[in-house]
Amino acid sequence: MTLSMQPYKGTRDFFPHDMAIQKWMFNRMRAVVEGYAYQEYDGPMLEPFELYAAKTGEEIVNQQLYWLMDRGERKMAIRPEMTPTLARMVASKSHELPRPIRWYSFPNLWRYERPQRGRLREHWQLNVDVLGGDALLADAEVLTLAFDIIKGFGGESHVSIRVNNRRMMDHLITATLGLTAEVGLKVTKAIDARAKIGEEAYAKWLSDLGLNAEQRSRLEDFFKASFEETARAMPCQGVEELQSLFAFLKESGVGEQVVFDPTIMRGLDYYTGTVFEMYDNSPDNRRAMFGGGRYDNLVGLFGNQKLSGVGFGMGDVSMRNFLETHKLLPEFPPAAEIFVSLPKVEFRGQAEAVARELRGLGFRVMTPLTAEGFGVQLKQAVRHGSRFAILFGETELAQGNLILKDLAKNEQSIVSIGDIGKEIGVRLKGSGT
Amino acid sequence: MTLSMQPYKGTRDFFPHDMAIQKWMFNRMRAVVEGYAYQEYDGPMLEPFELYAAKTGEEIVNQQLYWLMDRGERKMAIRPEMTPTLARMVASKSHELPRPIRWYSFPNLWRYERPQRGRLREHWQLNVDVLGGDALLADAEVLTLAFDIIKGFGGESHVSIRVNNRRMMDHLITATLGLTAEVGLKVTKAIDARAKIGEEAYAKWLSDLGLNAEQRSRLEDFFKASFEETARAMPCQGVEELQSLFAFLKESGVGEQVVFDPTIMRGLDYYTGTVFEMYDNSPDNRRAMFGGGRYDNLVGLFGNQKLSGVGFGMGDVSMRNFLETHKLLPEFPPAAEIFVSLPKVEFRGQAEAVARELRGLGFRVMTPLTAEGFGVQLKQAVRHGSRFAILFGETELAQGNLILKDLAKNEQSIVSIGDIGKEIGVRLKGSGT
């Protein structure tokens, strides 16, 4: 039997160039998040199925979860999101962890979906969460931090942050429209899906849920109103929270990019207050790049504790799309800076000594695994993208010298063995590489 | 229902301190491996079940593999090892990739095992492989590199590298003992298990396989002989390979730590030449820390290509045990270097501006999420391990000043807002932190 060489549908192989991009993205994100004193954590890939059954949305659990029975008959799921693991971990050390808890992670997550642009079965995600502290200051901090990440990539002029509040939406649904909480939850699913399914299907969905013409028209008026109009027409806690949040965000220097958007709901059932998504403003990349929100009861799943939090998840697929769309990715250096040749296997001891010294100085050094002539090995150095090649033969070694070839400048010089590291250092500095 | 707060049996939660150790270990490994011009790659967590059925050992596939049927009825396995994914990826781009291919990865791997010290159901592993090039030069390179990693941790005096050769073992089994290849494979399993199961069970296993007294005694003689004696008594390709490899390793400066050990077999079926394991010499940590070997046909699973390789996997659990045993782990810095206080929420704009500037200078800065008095906030700064706290009130702000508290030295000074970054920089440099 011949096995397939392709990765499982909806997943990716990270060849070195893809991996370099991934690492670069994550390290840039890490630098920003750690600038806000967040600490990295991780948890296992498998969690008990029930961890998701409890609070993750129904669609994910019933249609998208990857699960298995282990050999001890435990029903385990591959994590589709990180927040339940976070909640579990925090609950288990709740009494020891100083507040507020500011944590981040880069989990890979799995959902059985039809693969499409920006949506895969396995993806990686930066997860940032803060638990404890005044809710709205925390909400403002994570939004500021999210925006700083985009700024760190040089993408700040291309995005907007759309913000809404679930508490305000609850007020709209129960107090203003007079619906039950149960119907209300279903209405929020329709609102969440609106942009994806189109106006007609959306209107039909509302009718099917039993909303009469007046209720539908009030809902429509709400969506047409500006934030100021809504604040006047429907004063409530959710509106006040949004007002404070907008003020805090202005203080943090991200007022301009923040937009009120009552259609933002987020699919997950556990959000209770602020919800937000970041969008690429460019018309050919109209999906939400990432989103998050406030959850007030999640840790309570594990007992009587109360600990509220706010967080977001930023996916690698959308982020890479964004950076490629706006040409914000850098060039990546080749694996080897220096290629130390091996004309004859008898010289290997000396070649190894040179390579060892250069590695000790922090250079990335490649040595050939076959002894061959200069011509063949120079080609190999070029093919691997090395900036320098070090060549030598009996004559040079007898005089304690090496030939240093600068492949970028096509220059060549004789350098004594003891000076080779210094010489390369000077040349690398000179060229700014 | 109350959910369990513990991670799934045999897996770990990485709280920030554990994660800091993990990242530090991996980054140190990464620096060494990249010094040899290896490139990082990764593949999906799930692979087709058949990928492992083909070449991974029977014990793993039948007893330890985590597998599931996806919602499209595909039988998928959670990767128990990385080499099959590597082989698949290399096969898929075989014609584009310049030789030799030097790749590394940090996958998490799953095996359903009884959890015990050093063996967990989920663990992470540095995988290093080189494909193409002269076999023995490649073998010498990865062994040298593996040793350099240990050296990078300061652990070189505590380890030995035990080396064997499968080809020599095949010669022993077929030519010297006159066994069939099939029985031979089973004998290698017994040899591999010998140290674990004890002498008695080992002897019984051999009898059960049909080895007569003479065959058992010849096998025993072989294990008692020194490498030089074996080389004289049983000249063959495997012995020659070992002789060359030992010479190459001496040239690379790792002669002393290398030991011939004919009991090293490695469980995996695909090894064909050099096999090796690294051991902690200290008596209370006698497991193999990691191991690897040469595989000559693995890529051939995907068609007619031939590409041989050598590689090793170095697990996070054993490495952390090793570093802890020998006290080779450093202290890790706290999440925040600087704590910018917030005595009143009205001052948040100014506090945010200070925090923003310090973050821009590369400092890790924490701001409180609740406005509170100096006393409470200083305690918070201390609890989070901050080196500095920045305090201010109306009076200080009116004069354009801040109070800088150096919590390590218990000193306090008035600094103008514009100089705060410089002042902290000087103090951090002065203390060598």
Image (spheres, coloured by chain):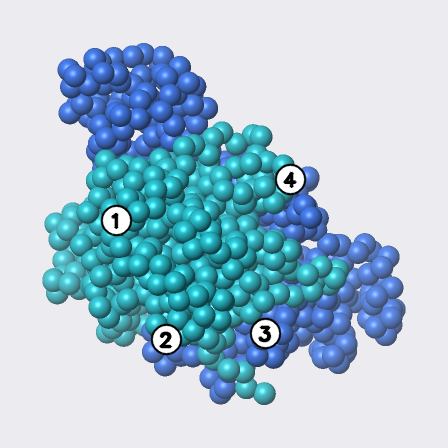
Chain colours: A blue, B cyan
Given the image, what chain letter belongs to the residue carrying mark 3? A
Separation of disc 1 and disc 2 at Cα? 26 Å
Tag on residue B200? 2
Q: Give the mark nearest the N terminus, 1 or 2.
A: 2
Q: Work out whether disc 4 and disc 2 sit on a shared chain.
A: yes
Say whether disc 4 or disc 1 marks the residue closer to the N-terminus. 1
Mark 4 vs mark 2: which is more N-terminal? Answer: 2
Q: Secondary structure at mark 1?
A: helix
Chain containing the residue with disc 4: B
Same chain? Circles 1 and 2: yes
Amino acid at pointer 3: Asp
Does residue B210 lie above or below B141 as drawn?
below
Q: Which residue is mark 3?
A: A70
Q: Position of residue B158 (x, y in %)?
A: 20, 58
Label 3 neighbourhood size at 10 Å, few (<14), some (14-19), many (20+)?
some
Q: Is residue A112 left or right of residue B348?
A: right
Which residue has dot 1 on it?
B229
Asked whether the beta carbons under mark 3 and mark 4 sit within 8 Å of each other, the answer is no
Q: Nearer the viewer, mark 2 or mark 3?
A: 2
Identify the mark at residue B303; answer none if there is no mark: 4
